[in-house]
Amino acid sequence: MNDSPHAGEHLLIVDDDARVRQMLRRYFESEGFRVSDARNGAQMRERLQGSRVDLVLLDLMLPDGEDGLSLARDIRAGSDVPIIMLTGRSDVVDRVVGLEIGADDYIAKPFHLREVLARVKTVLRRRRPRQSAAERQDVIRFDGWVLDLGRRQLRAADGSDIVLTTGEFDMLAVLAGQPGHVFTRNALMDVTRGRALEVYDRTIDAQIARLRKKIERDPRRPELIKSVRGVGYVFTGRHSSGEGAAARRRITPRSQSS
């Protein structure tokens, strides 16, 4: 019996460098993870179809005409599995585009294995459903939508589940948790990323745009998440009576600027 806190958590490492794959695989297996690896997009798709994967470590530079950005788009087209991008590039644009596509984090090469482990734990912790009964029952209801914070699920008025990435869910939880409060982009980045990170306005704007496509009747004329020119965003949906109080207590950003 494996007593590791990560037993059963399955990582997929996608990198064309066999040495990097072997190094990461050995390290994470020693930490109790189950690990698979792939050297290109074809192998990645095969691994994703073969079993449930909890997180993908995806290299930006890959052979065979498919880079990490195109593969991240491919993953996001049908899955909300967390993605951490590994990049040897210093180009800020690549990092921004990766986050815009829906990657949960990025790590620059060369990296320290402990840093990669810490980032993986952080992303998985954000994804993991809360365990207490009280939190499992904590939901925010607005305009026919049901946002279940414990199970990390969003249900539409017709009962269908809406697939959100980790970042999209966290963004909606923060905004819906404090309706009427104007959040700056800095505050949203601080809360949803959970660590110090350069703030890119385009990253937040792109994530809001993706979220609007999933919850707004007309994303071009949003009624739930509105822009505040020169400042940020505000949630204007209508909560059902008494809902969201516990969420508002928990989802207070660590730093905000007016």
Image: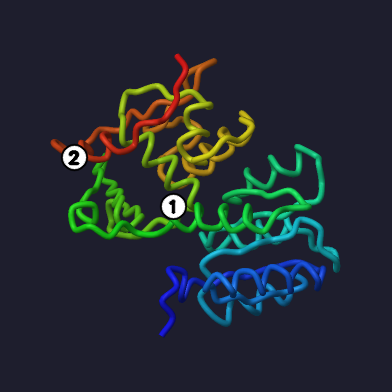
What's the amino acid at mark 1?
Arg
Please give the count of numbered marks on the rendered protein. Answer: 2
Reply above or below: 128 against 102. Answer: below
Reply above or below: 248 against 9. Answer: above
Asked which quadrant contains residue 131, the reply is: bottom left
Give the number of the disc on residue 254.
none
Q: Return the disc, 1 or 2, that comes first in the chain's sequence.
A: 1
| Residue that carries the numbered disc 2 in the rendered image | 243
**Residue 187 in picture, x, y percent from top left:** 48, 28
**Residue 70 in picture, x, y percent from top left:** 73, 57
Name the residue nearer the viewer: 8 or 99.
8
Name the residue nearer the viewer: 130 or 100.
130
**Residue 188 in picture, x, y percent from top left:** 48, 32
**Residue 167 in picture, x, y percent from top left:** 50, 46
Q: Is residue 108 left or right of residue 218?
A: right
Residue depicted at 60% across the width and 75% down the height:
35
